[in-house]
């Protein structure tokens, strides 16, 4: 009898144990960017990160943001489907860091990518934490500021 209860418990446990992962996209650029967030082989969502805003979305899944699969790989991702160089980011559990993806020129913590309107923006992971509940990325403006901005004259 105990064996049957254990088997039933193991089958039900994945159905009732869930974690929410909050994805934060800090868009400091002046252009909207289409973002796709999700878990490999799980939930995903696509939305537009509006200019000069922080977009927050939460997904419900059995894995935490910093969880790993049986193979030891990260399970969360962020991609930018309208970028011609396939920009994106994944979590690497072994190093506990966010790794940028796609064909790019940049550094390990930042890269150039294109916004939806073709404007160049800088995708950045510097000083952004990933933990069990939050996955953050930052998009910065890379163009020249206009002459009316304080301190540029």
Image: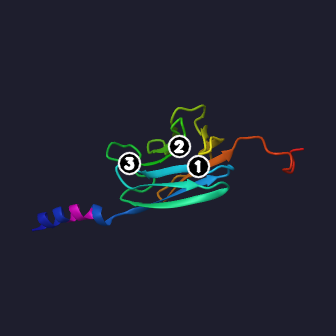
> For the residues marked 2 and 1, what is the alpha-carbon distance in whole angstroms?
8 Å
Tell me whether the residue at label 2 lies in contact with that at label 1, contact meaning CB atoms closer than 8 angstroms. Answer: yes
Pinpoint residue 2: horizontal percent, then vertical percent: 13, 67
In which quadrant of the rendered image does the N terminus lie?
bottom left
Q: Quadrant of residue 116?
A: top right
Taking 152 as reference, is 44 left or right? left
Taking 41 as reference, is 96 left or right? right
> For the residues marked 2 and 3, what is the alpha-carbon distance in whole angstroms?
19 Å
Residue ID at (48%, 50%): 36
Q: Residues within 10 Å of mark 3 (few under 14, many from 20)?
A: few
Residue situated in front as seen by the camera: 56 or 35: 35
Q: Nearer the viewer, mark 2 or mark 3?
A: 2
Q: Give the magenta range.
A: 9-13
Determine which residue is flagged by label 1.
33
> For the residues marked 3 and 1, what is the alpha-carbon distance in whole angstroms?
21 Å
Pinpoint residue 84: horizontal percent, then vertical percent: 54, 36
Determine which residue is flagged by label 2.
82
Q: Earlier in the sequence, mark 3 or mark 1?
A: 1
Residue ID at (62%, 54%): 26
Tell me whether the residue at label 2 lies in contact with that at label 3, contact meaning CB atoms closer than 8 angstroms. Answer: no
Residue ID at (52%, 52%): 130
């Amino acid at each position: 009898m105990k064996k049957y209860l254990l088997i039933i418990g193991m089958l039900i446990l994945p159905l009732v144990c869930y974690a929410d992962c909050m994805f934060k996209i800090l868009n400091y650029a002046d252009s909207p960017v289409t973002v796709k967030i999700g878990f490999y082989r799980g939930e995903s969502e696509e939305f537009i990160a509006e200019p000069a805003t922080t977009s927050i979305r939460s997904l419900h899944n059995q894995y935490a943001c910093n969880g790993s699969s049986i193979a030891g790989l990260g399970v969360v991702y962020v991609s930018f489907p309208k970028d011609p160089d396939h920009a994106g980011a994944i979590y690497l559990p072994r190093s506990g860091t966010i790794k940028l993806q796609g064909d790019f020129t940049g550094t390990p913590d930042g890269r150039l990518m294109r916004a939806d309107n073709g404007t160049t923006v800088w995708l950045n992971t510097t000083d952004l934490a990933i933990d069990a509940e939050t996955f953050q990325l930052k998009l910065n403006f890379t163009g020249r500021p206009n002459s009316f901005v304080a301190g540029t004259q």
